[in-house]
Amino acid sequence: MGKSIQLGGYFLLGVSCCGLFSYTAYIIPRFQYYAFWLVVVVSLLFIVCGLADDFLAEAMGVDYQSYIGGLIVCIAIVLVGSLIQWVK
């Protein structure tokens, strides 16, 4: 039970950080260009992580299912964190 609470806390912390950055880019027009390139870089990193999944899972020392689960959690954090600002 403690691990699930800790994992949920990390997820909410990641969502909060992504949401704060996304909301800052929404409020301050100067940060919109930085946010655009950050989204491009993060998307490219996720693509590389998806293509090199076997190599990265072996390099990190985790099994394949844990690596894919972690990648899905990271993508969910970025999606939820960047979409949360649009909910009104």
Image (tube, rainbow, N blue to C red):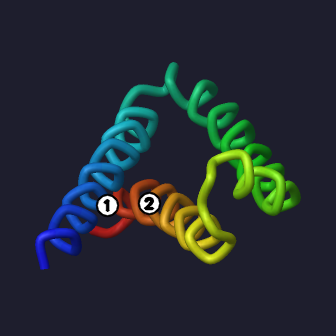
Return the residue nearer the eye: 30 or 60.
60
Residue 87 is left or right of residue 34, and the answer is left
Residue indicated by mark 2: 77
> Label 2 vs label 1: CA separation?
6 Å
Residue 80 is left or right of residue 36, and the answer is left
37 up-or-down from 17: above or below: above
At 13% across and 80% down in the image, what residue appears?
Answer: 1
* Element class at badge 1: helix
The image shows residue 65 at horizontal and vertical percentages of 62, 77
Q: Answer whether labels 2 and 1 touch (C-beta < 8 Å).
A: yes
Residue indicated by mark 1: 11
At 49% across and 67% down in the image, what residue appears?
Answer: 73
* Element class at badge 2: helix
Return the residue nearer the eye: 68 or 32.
68
At 57% across and 34% down in the image, what residue appears?
Answer: 35
The image shows residue 58 at horizontal and vertical percentages of 74, 54
The three-letter amino acid code for the residue at tag 1 is: Phe
